[in-house]
Image (tube, grey):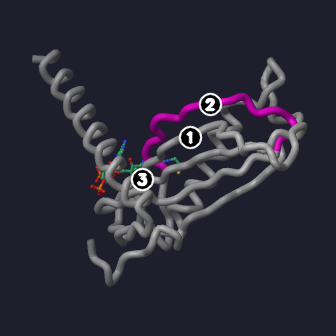
Amino acid sequence: MNEQSGKATSYSRVTLSRIMTAVDVNLYGTVHGGVIVKFIDDVAGAVAARHTGGTAVTAAIDEIVFVEPVRVGDLVHAQAQVNWTGHSSLEVGCRLIAEPWDQPLEADPLVVATAYLVFVAVDAEGKPRPVRPVLPESPEDVQRFREAEIRRAHRLAKRAAILESRNGAGS
Ligand SMILES: CC(C)(COP(=O)(O)OP(=O)(O)OC[C@H]1O[C@@H](n2cnc3c(N)ncnc32)[C@H](O)[C@@H]1OP(=O)(O)O)[C@@H](O)C(=O)NCCC(=O)NCCS
């Protein structure tokens, strides 16, 4: 990693908070998955823009896990940070924590969703542009960087295997 031009993880870490309302619910009365996904994309997009110092588009959203239902009145915090950087892409990790409206403040925060998103920094023409490296600070940041490399390797391998299968099927 280039320590001169890199940015520490904390430089672009972002938390957004909002209270869920009646317009956010699905037919079952809990918060719609699409509302959660938009919240995740919003916070991760803010992180990507901060880290890359410009426009970055969502290329992929991986492994969204809805751990617990969210209800109207719950205060939800979306926390996100850069886990990994490549040449023009970066992985942002996101975790949503809820403070249920009917539980005391001392109650343990509830993890309601997690996700990994890949962003690509783009120029004015929408073409990929280089990103500065992220500089992990804590042991957890270093671990997240390593795990993101594993996910990156799996994404590339999966894409290559599917392309190979399609090419094989057409021959
Ligand atoms: C994302 C996008 C810019 C990539 O363009 P591209 O010409 O295919 O880019 P390349 O093949 O040169 O790859 C550029 C980087 O993106 C990564 N990438 C591209 N598609 C990806 C995908 N589906 N998943 C993960 N990474 C991806 C590549 O691995 C590469 O990473 P690296 O530079 O760090 O090694 C283009 O596909 C795009 O504009 N997509 C639409 C984005 C959008 O509208 N998002 C929703 C609104 S923000």
Mark seen at residue 6: none
Residue 73 belongs to magenta span: yes
Q: Is residue 103 left or right of residue 14?
A: right
Is 17 above or below relative to 123?
A: above
Mark 1 and mark 2 in contact (Cβ < 8 Å)?
Answer: yes
Q: Amino acid at mark 1?
A: Thr
Whole-percent x and y of residue 19?
83, 47
Whole-percent x and y of residue 56?
48, 60
The residue under label 1 is 114
Of tags 3 and 1, the one toward the viewer is: 1
Label 2's element? loop
Mark seen at residue 67: 2
Label 3's element? strand
The residue under label 3 is 91
Highlighted range, magenta: 58-74
> Quadrant of residue 3 in the image?
bottom left
Marks 3 and 2, the one that precedes in the sequence: 2
Whole-percent x and y of residue 108?
73, 44
Mark 2 and mark 3 in contact (Cβ < 8 Å)?
Answer: no
Marks 3 and 1, the one that precedes in the sequence: 3
Q: Work out which quarter of the rendered image holds the N terminus and state it.
A: bottom left
Q: Amino acid at mark 3?
A: Glu
- Within 10 Å of disc 1 (Cα), the crowding (few <14, some 14-19, many 20+) is many
